Image (spheres, grey):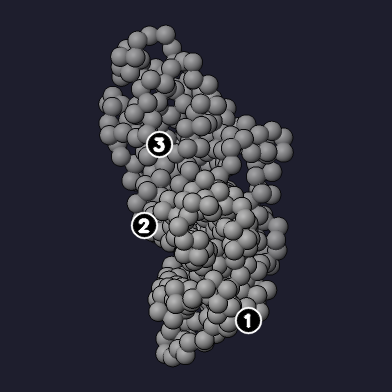
Amino acid sequence: MVDHYVDNQWQGRDTCPDLEAFKKQLLRGFIEHFDGYRIGRVPHIFNPHAVLEFLSDLEDKMPDTVSFGDTRDWVDTACLWMVMKIQLASMGDHDRYFKRLVENYYLERVSAEVGGAVAVLERASSLDEAIGLIGAEEDPQQLTGDAFAVDKELADICTKSRAKDFLELLALGEQDISARAAMLLFYQAGYIAPRTDGRMAIPSTEVFKELKRYHRVVSERHNRRSCLPDDTHALMGIRDGNLVRFAVSLHGILALMTGLSSKKAEIDYQHIVTAFLGPVRDIGFDLMCEANAGSGYVDVVVIPRADHSRHGGTSRMYVFELKRHPRGEDSYAKLMSLDQRISVEQPVRDLAIVGHIQTRDRYLQNAMVRARGCEELVLASVAFWMHRVYMVVRRFRSQRQNQSQVNDWAPLPYSDTDIQDAPGQSIWAMVVDGNIEISTIVSAAEWPE
């Protein structure tokens, strides 16, 4: 094809001083960039889409301006969008596999330069001779020790896959998968391919660059998720069921939003809370906004996923009902005076109670059904007044009997020990009829004696 294209279609064929050298230049580029899939014992299969796209773009170029550096044709015909969705359960095995694939890639490059297809191409006296030699079977490499063990493990994953590995791939993008399943995905998508000696290898330079980018992204994502439970998520309180800590963290965010005005609707606060809760997806929760609750739509729901258990903590489902109290027409400075805040706290509390009753009467039964498999169910009614909140929180404990899949729920009252860490300088919290009531409108330290 290269021979025919250069001799009959390439626009520079009449002015090029050495057509044979140009053909070799093109073939070398194809070997390094578009050579990939292996079918049986055939060592070199080029991506036809990649070659045709490249040649169609070559018409107005001369040998000294040809570049393969910007080509993405292997990747464009594969499944990178799936690969980038991978969330790994651990990086240990994955790093070991990836390191070996990279080693095989560099071995392949060195082999190609010293005695492989590229070297054959450079030594051949004609293009026909080079193509004949390149098409010959590759010499298998004899490997021993750890490298041999990892190569065999990779080959077994790809060619002797278990049903369990394929089932893991069904959850891609929704829960963590093992390193085995990730390697199987690479194989199925063509990002790694078998060599004639049975090893798995990265098929081309372009794919190698893309997999390096993938590995960097996935590693950074895993590292962020590994450290979050001890800092961000601990502060948010969702992982540990500490709604006092949640209120303190939310108050810290809202305190930066002094521009919240009477024009802000409940939907604006819903967006704020949803964005604030976004990181819980990294520790095994799903986050839903305007979730169907049977007899209406509850504002925000946080529910454990199947992989929640590996992050630790009790399995809890949270239901947040959000309300908004009007700001008032006075200046911000007057509204934030202690007297004004004390006077508005009771109306905001009344609104939070309304939300609490609404959640209990309209959504509780449906929430108990959806929380099947959870250990606790937490209902939180949050009433906003500008960047201050009043919360009423109630919880229930599952009392599943005899391994039944149907939960029986019983109230799980809060006690004073559940609010002992409340910082008096920013909020106050107290237990009322087994529920926790939390206010950031007036702190415990500000209340008059």
Residue drawn at the location 42% of the way across and 86% of the way down: 146
Mark-to-mark CA distance, 3 and 1: 61 Å
The residue under the point 72% across, 35% down is: 295
* Whether residue 439 can be seen here: yes
Q: Nearer the viewer, mark 2 or mark 1?
A: 1
Q: Secondary structure at mark 1?
A: loop
Residue 223 percent coordinates (x, y): 38, 59
Mark identifier at residue 227: 2
Q: Report the label total.
A: 3
The kind of residue on which mark 2 rests is Cys
Front residue of 355/445: it is 355
> Around disc 1, counting alpha carbons within 10 Å, would you say few (fewer than 14), some (14 to 19), or many (20 or more)?
some
Q: Residues within 10 Å of mark 3 (few under 14, many from 20)?
A: many
Q: Earlier in the sequence, mark 2 or mark 1?
A: 1
Q: Helix, strand, or loop for circle 2?
A: helix
Q: Mark 2 to mark 1: distance in Å?
A: 46 Å
**Cβ–Cβ under 8 Å for marks 2 and 1:** no
- Tell me residue 332's x, y (percent): 34, 14
**In which quadrant will I find the C terminus?**
top left
| Label 2–label 3 contact, CB within 8 A | no
**Measured along the vertical axis of the image, is residue 354 above or below residue 286?**
above
**N-term mark: 3 or 1:** 1
- Could you say whether the residue bearing mark 3 is in a helix, strand or loop? helix
Amino acid type assigned to the residue bearing label 3 in the image: Leu
Residue occupying the point 65% across, 41% down: 364
* Disc on res. 250: 3
Q: Is residue 358 above or below residue 329?
A: below
Instruction: Report which residue position mark 1 lands on.
Output: 41
Q: Position of residue 248 (x, y in %)?
A: 37, 38
